[in-house]
Amino acid sequence: MNLPRLFHISHLISTALLIATPLRAAEIDFSTDIQPIFAKRCFACHGPSKHESGIAFHVRTMAIAESESGEKAIVPGDPAASELLRRVTADNEAERMPPEGDPLSAREVQLLGEWIQQGATYAPHWAFTKIIRPAFPKVSRTEWVRNEIDMFVVARLEREGLSPSPAADRAKLLRRIYLDLVGLLPPSSETEAFINDTSQRAYEKVIDRLLASDHFGERWGRHWLDLARYADTFGYERDDARPNAWRYRDWVIHSFNQNQPYDQFVTEQLAGDLLDDPSSEQRIATGLHRMNIKNNESGINREDYRNRETVDRVNTTGTAMLGLTIGCGQCHSHKYDPISQTEYYQFSAFFNNVEEKDIDIPGSPTDRDRYDRALAAYEDKKKRLESLQLLLKNMHKYKTPAQWRQSVDDDNQKWTNQAKTIETASDKGPERWTTDLTKEDAVAYGFPKEIAGAISVPENERTAEQLNLLNEFHPSLNVKVSEISACVRPPSQRLDTLNLDDSLSSTLSSVGSRALEQDAAAGLFWNSLESRFDDVRKSIRQLSVEKRHLPKPYIMTVSEVTKDRRDTHLLIRGDFKNKGREVVAATPAIFNPLSVRGEIPDRLDLARWIISRDNPLTSRVAVNHLWSHLFGAGIVTSTDDFGTQGESPSHPELLDWLANEFVESQWDRKKLIKTIVLSATYRQTARGRPDLQMIDPQNQLLARQSRFRVESEIVRDLFLDAADLLYRRIGGPTIHPAVPTAVSELGYKYKTRWIVSSNPERYRRGLYIFFKRTNPYPSLTIFDSPESNLCQAKRNRSNTPLQALTTLNDPVFVECARAMGQLLARKRADHDSRIQFAARKCLSRSLSPAEVKTLLDLFEAEKTWYGGHSEDAIQLVGEYGTSNVANSEAAAWVAVARTILNLDEFVTRE
Amino acid sequence: MDPIFEFQDRTRRQFLTTAASGLGGVALASLQHREGLSQTLAKRSFNPLAERPSHFAPRAKACIFIYMAGGPSQVDLFDPKPVLNQRDGKKMPDSLLKDVEFAFVKKDEAVLKGSAAKFRPRGQCGVEYSDMIPQIGSCADDIALIRTVHGEQFNHHPGQLLLSCGKAELGRPTIGSWLLYGLGSETENLPGYVVLTAGRGASGGSSNWSSGFLPSTYQGVSFRDSGDPVLFLSNPPGIQRNNQRRTLDAISKLNELRHNQMRDMEIASRTAQYELAFRMQSAAPELTDLSGESAATLDSYGIGRKTPRPTADMQSGETYHRFSANCLLARRLVERGVRFINIVHASWDQHGNLKHDLAWNCRMADQPIAALLRDLKQRGMLDDTLVIWGSEFGRTPLGQGGDGRDHHPFAFSMWMAGGGAKGGTVYGQTDEIGWAPVHNPVHVNDFQATLLHLFGLDHRRLSINHRGLQVRLTNLAGHVIHDVIA
């Protein structure tokens, strides 16, 4: 192991230095190197809120002052005289600081020592200083550098005495770029073409194509939706559905696909309604601040919850766009970041007059059409079910099919007669048509009450009004005739709605009651009438729930209260009932000044302040988000906290260079992503390295790529993709894939009943799955989807047995294994080739002989076993059987497919 | 071979070949890469559920939290108020009403509502319990009853969050997650945090057993009433245990080969999770198979009892049996090393129909809960198993409509038994109508601090840095109530 360059400060700490790790920058920077140590390990007792023993480290004057004991914690220029260093390295546990948790690391001690040696200067927090385009560092390994990013990365590596890793092999690189940019598997044909394309621009061409794909917006839009706390229900107790939330989701997808500049992206979401003559798209964008949880429980204090919603809007804006934990200022002045409580409420004043507004979509014929079509389909289905219900009810009145069959004839005869009688009457003309009709006839034919009444009166006693009525009714007789004639339908036609197989249908329609009574199939069918009737009744009940989910076209937006605007007050300890002094909208003083267009600062002013070139946070935070999705972690690992309590950037100059480039490019997201993925840094292999294992287990130095499990939605997408089941339609209303009933029925009042989407809708990508906050789709949460209650800047990546059970046994995932097994069973090739085909499809590589053998052995073992267990084989293969292939063999291919799909490598981006 | 890889290789081989391969004592890869909690979690970089020492000697090893969601009426069950009964139908003093809010009750119409329940002293200790829960009352000598629990949330979901997470805020870990995070899990075959539901689910849904910002490793796993106790536990049709085993062997082998290429311990960790899943596939059905329990035990819990009709609001005909089974399952889970078991039943939210519905709920809950306490005691398990009975709030001494009570977070009752709780005690006193505490108020956060204390955890030290804040179960408050600890 390479020992670090030692810097002897005093004998007190030299022993600690022997095991120091070399992760340190050339010069000590207060805000990235020292402040975080103080913030995390010291401030709790010696910081802004507590000065135990008269010691505090948050301001220099206090840190170098004499403490109650007479010692000086820090003596600038003299580490050996500084009590701080003595205490953090003390062997005696009673003396050692901090009293809780592990002692400071050797590296931290070293940093403190060097910093004191250099004069213990304090500097403003790095993230709050203006971004200046950094100079490029000198590097010796120039042949490795592909673009500017690599200069920063390799310079740091060289400082640490490390070398970067070689590029990943081409096939795995292609898989990586597919997963990162579109979240799908590269088709095998493309992998092959890419491997064979040795041209200079081969890689760049793939990138350009993927950036232009509409799936790019799905992949990257979903990252933003985590920040936007997007969900399809309101949350809290009632957790009602928001049938139109997806319009905002689609707006986000579209924005990424159109490569909308990030400054506009931010502005439209914060203040689209305040732009001049806003388009409906710009209004949909304001849906960002309708995605918050909202309590619709009865009996709540509305003002309390309105206030909570405002707090959430403030916090979301702070976290997503500024990387600030501004929410801390709700109850007290921020302890660590320079934001006072007053400033928090000034910031919240921008959102205090937000009004929630659901508006019709102006000029959106597509949506209107979609709704009309869905409504028509609903009506149609309802009618069909109701007539089916009627038919079954009618059949059920008869003990045997033959009796029913007879009744059909009788009815047909009856209606034929009726039609004939009415026709005859009609022929007599308007004056005379009632001559041969009685009141009973009129009732039987379903004539209106007044008509029946008039007919019951003898002809010569009828009033003028009645005569007139009858006269006017005459033309309706023809309509009636055709109506009644339409009821005359042969039995076979009546049975249509039942969808019976042809032979049963013809049996039931046949005359000859004896045969019918002895027919077994007909008998079985007759016995099933009751359960069929129940099923239909259930379907009708379900349908009424479905109606609530119809895509009624409106958009959820925010607008500004204009009349009776609310005053904003500081709320003491965040209590909405405990109002302090009044405040007006303003941004925290430590940052760039706010310019105000009108009399009162509004959300549009705020948006423009956020996207101002002078704002030190916005571009840094944005590029860090983008970066984090391409390396598994940000340059600042605390993507949600750029304040003094957050992590320091691993590569501060690189971050600033990227942030500056981003602004210079007019906030071009695709361009930034392209720059990053073109770098040699990105292209490195993710293979672990012994020399990095101890010194950089978290891969902060980027001497290799990272390897990590893909997100919940993508796990499912990859399964569907590998099985050729994925339905790639972009956008539109949510989907409901199959879910165990125990899950769909959990939750409160079942207001959002889960009706499984039809094929192929249910095979759409995971980001379209209806997200119910109190009862989310299981495979999503099992794989760490955010709960979507609060803005979330990064996801956990847990690894649990429930995940294994899900991909092994969840019917949705098992179906993928079946479908993929079928692909293998159908392939005309030897077994080795089929296995390699599956590997190339799923893993983008060919397997080694040892790997092939493992799967071949499995195939043979399963084939033999299923050969003796044909029932199991049939069950496993299900509807994915293959003609000409024995079930035992087909089942064995399913087992092989299921194994490959459950490999760590399959769900891992490496 | 490089020493680091030698080490890695050894650990990998160890858990790929050990018969009980999996979590116990075996090094697993960092559970996440450089994530928000990584600084904290990386330190336990191997198994996130490995057992960890408590801050000081624990009294309890496991907790059964009986969560009666909706807000049971304390003045009808635990807190006798003769004066309230005398003033039945009278208006409440304005002074008391001035600063309070209700979900539904209208202040100008509100009148006090006495309780029809009879209270009497129980056990050696003589603490009074209502006749609506005679069996629980008979366990009085093992119970520490607290009559002055209070919070500030008067709506269900926020109140449930306060009780489960310490703050009425979504996105925080729940009590069980905190315990798993703080102490790890003893079981290698079952989840360490299990949720059992009877009747309608609690209104807060999965947020009541969420791990919040902690990884899902620490979240509660909801066992289901029928079919598979754990979601996706059964093999798919046509896959028998031997098929599953062969597939897992192949996965393990192939993962190992990939590990040799990529040298990422996360791969080995994935294999271990698959093995745990496989063990869970047999452990969970064994858990729910009650055929090994004696007839006397089954009877005592009321397994198989009929649910009386008419049922209470939104309950099914299975509820009584289900609740009994859940109480028995809770004991079996504790026996198998599960840390935290949440028995949820809803709803106790009697805005109306109080007389019938409360009695119906009590008949459901009384016998199995008492049976659980006795069973644990008889098996010597009660000493280190903490049983808690509670809800997000109680109900008003005021009536609502003719036969109901509204939400009341200002003073309500909870109790604990076993696990170091001081049996036969009653703590805290409310005023004569049961409106507010007059002696020894116990905030929900105090209750949580006490709970953690019984597990040997200092609620101020068990914290997680999240977004720059030291987040604790007890929020910024909480005091241990030493008087309820034996």
Image (tube, coloured by chain):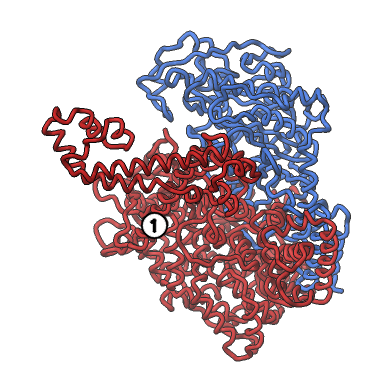
Chain colours: A red, B blue
Say whether residue A294 is visible: yes
Q: Viewer-proximal residue, A118 or B330?
A: B330
Q: Position of residue A376 (x, y in %)?
A: 39, 53
Is residue B282 shown left or right of residue A151? right
Q: Viewer-proximal residue, A155 or A781?
A: A781
Give the residue pinned by disc 1. A373
Up-down relation of residue A641 to residue B168 (above or below)? below
Q: Position of residue A823 (x, y in %)?
A: 68, 69
Q: Position of residue B356 (x, y in %)?
A: 54, 19
Name the residue at 41% across, 52% down. Answer: A290
* Label 1 crowd bin: few (<14), some (14–19), many (20+), radius 10 Å: some
- Secondary structure at badge 1 equals helix
Say whether residue B207 is visible: no
Q: Viewer-proximal residue, A753 or A398?
A: A398
Q: Quadrant of the N terminus of chain B?
A: bottom right
Q: Chain of mark 1?
A: A
Up-down relation of residue A27 to residue A231 (above or below)? below
Is residue B407 shown left or right of residue A603? right
Label 1 is placed on what type of residue? Arg
Q: Position of residue A707 (x, y in %)?
A: 68, 69
| Total tally of numbered discs in the picture | 1
